[in-house]
Amino acid sequence: MERVDFTIDKKMANHINGSIKGLNENITTNKKEIHRTDDSWEEISIEVPWGTVQGKWWGSRNKQPIIALHGWQDNCGTFDRLCPLMPADIPVFCIDLPGHGKSSHYPQGMQYFIFWDGICLIRRIVRKFGWKRITLMGHSLGGALTFMYAASFPSEVEKLINIDIAGPTVRSIERQAEMTGWALDKFLDYEELPESKMPCYSYNEMIKLVLDAYEGSVDEASVRILMKRGMAPAPIHLNKDGYHFARDIRLKISLLGMFTADQVMAYAKRINCKVLNIRGDPGMKFENPQVYEEVISTLRQNAELVIYKTIPGTHHLHLVTPERVAPHINSFLLNH
């Protein structure tokens, strides 16, 4: 993977703590180049009422970070290839959403309303650390959540970076009405599924299964990155060899709590921060693709700045081809 270099002058470099974990420094004439490495992060655990929320904190713990949220059924490893290409002096806190990666699952009896739960989670974390004027970055579902947070707390967000998502996924009200009964029964089926019936796979079987499921959005190397947090050894008491998915199977029921186009536009009008939206080409295939452009147009009404870029790549372009995405994010962070 090609590495993007970010060059700063000595005066700026003197303000950077040279002891930050994982930084490599290459001295050249009158310039100092700072790079993040693949291991420039530490595991973070935040206590919440239902357990813990886990994440990876890239860079200094002494500065307020960008808050980064991943997509549906992914985990915070989705940013593992992007973060090393971002400015090393800007920390990034990548979170495993509830039920994903290494974060705790919800207790039995609780449902996931994925397009709402994450908004409260962001708020919980912001209040815990007392952060002000935050920068948010999200991919797919994570981008829908950061969009909603920026709309819900418009005076408290400075910058919003979304990757291959404009706002929450829009479903027709007819489809929601038609599928509600099915979704409720399916949720209860998953809840009642005994642990002994949970599928278990060898490592290679797991990688192939996930690669096939993503239908070309990721490559094998990307799957191996995601599965570092996306799979876990089968529990010893089951006497099974192999691995199972770490994420909560109940997350598969994502229909409940969806949005209409009118709702999304109402929230879009409330966003007044600086926005960078990166659309993959071809990227994600949406049920209502015209909504994406309509959201961008609506954002331009009140947002301080809207930069909209279309970049060749799949829905997971930030993970598969981060060298295409990073320069646009870095320019937005450093120049706007």
Image (spheres, rainbow, N blue to C red):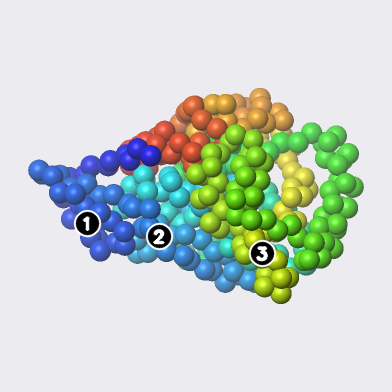
Image quarter where the N terminus lies is: top left
Residue 41, disc? 2
Residue at the (63%, 71%) spot, across then down: 51
* Residue 163 in sight in this render: no
Kind of residue indicated by mark 2 = Trp
Residue 163 horizontal side relative to residue 248, left or right = left
Residue 34 horizontal side relative to residue 126, left or right = left
Mark closer to the chain start, 1 or 2:
1
Residue at the (25%, 49%) spot, across then down: 34
Image quarter where the C terminus lies is: top left
Q: Position of residue 328 (x, y in %)?
A: 40, 35
Mark 1, Cα crowd under 10 Å, few <14 / some 14-19 / many 20+, is few
Kind of residue indicated by mark 3 = Asp
In the structure shown, which secondary structural element does the residue marked by tag 3 occupy?
loop
Q: Which residue is more in the foreground, 127 or 241?
A: 241
Q: Position of residue 161 (x, y in %)?
A: 48, 41
Mark closer to the chain start, 3 or 2:
2
Pointers 3 and 2 in contact (C-beta within 8 Å): no
* Residue 329 in sight in this render: yes
Mark 2, Cα crowd under 10 Å, few <14 / some 14-19 / many 20+, is many
Using the image, determine if residue 251 lies above or below residue 267.
below
Q: Which residue is more in the foreground, 148 or 165?
A: 165
In the structure shown, which secondary structural element does the residue marked by tag 2 occupy?
strand
**Residue under label 3:** 241
Kind of residue indicated by mark 1 = His
Residue at the (36%, 44%) spot, across then down: 85
Using the image, determine if residue 273 lies above or below residue 301.
below
**Residue under label 1:** 15
Pointers 3 and 1 in contact (C-beta within 8 Å): no
In the structure shown, which secondary structural element does the residue marked by tag 1 occupy?
loop
